[in-house]
Image (tube, rainbow, N blue to C red):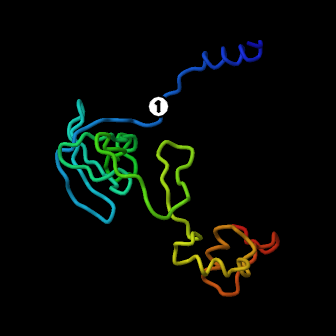
Amino acid sequence: MPDTALACLHALLLLPSLPSRIRWRRGRVTETGRRGRDTLQLTVEVLDEGSLPALAYPSLVGIPEVGDDVLLNTTALAQGLGTGGFAMVVAVPDRLPPDPEGPGHLVKARYTPLQVTVSGVDEQETEHHALLAEADDLGACRSSSPTCTRRCRRSSSGCWPPTPTSRSRT
């Protein structure tokens, strides 16, 4: 093995282990609660932590049932952050949902373990495809800034990015 390859291998072996970025918990569903369009509230019993409110997205993880073991992400819940007070169901490991079917070639959460496919507005199967296929440009909008985009939606005349002399100072 060349010296450089050996040095690289040695450096890799000496890398410090990285801390987890997700607070993982395994639990058992004890109750099902309110259902939404693609949500299901649950109560999950977690060893050494008791009952936790949990939220499942059936289109992502399947439909958890009472008695199912579930894998939870409790990171935001443990920190009191914006999950609405719920642990998030990441998987029902003993009963995985079927593979996705149908349209959707875009991948969200790319480069993460929780990638999902979604349908893009420009896909041929969407109701918007014909309109986008006919478009030559973005009309009068010359900027991709969020402010300009909002103004373009409200105005048929489009918008231009402000010039340095026309900016108001606060």
Q: Residue at x 35, y 44 (%)?
A: 91
Q: Quadrant of residue 58?
A: bottom left
Residue projecting furthest to the bottom? 156
Q: Say few, some or many: other residues with alpha carbon within 10 Å of mark 1 (under 14 / 14 to 19 / 20 or more).
A: few
Q: Position of residue 5 (x, y in %)?
A: 73, 17
Q: Residue at x 78, y 75 (%)?
A: 166
Q: Quadrant of residue 72?
A: top left
Residue 54 vs residue 168, the one in the foreground: 54
| Quadrant location, the N terminus | top right
Q: Which residue is mark 1?
A: 20
Q: Secondary structure at mark 1?
A: loop
Q: Residue at x 72, y 81 (%)?
A: 139
Q: Position of residue 84 (x, y in %)?
A: 34, 54
Q: Amino acid at mark 1?
A: Ser
- Tell me if residue 11 comes above or below residue 109 in the rendering: above
Residue 115 vs residue 86, the one in the foreground: 115
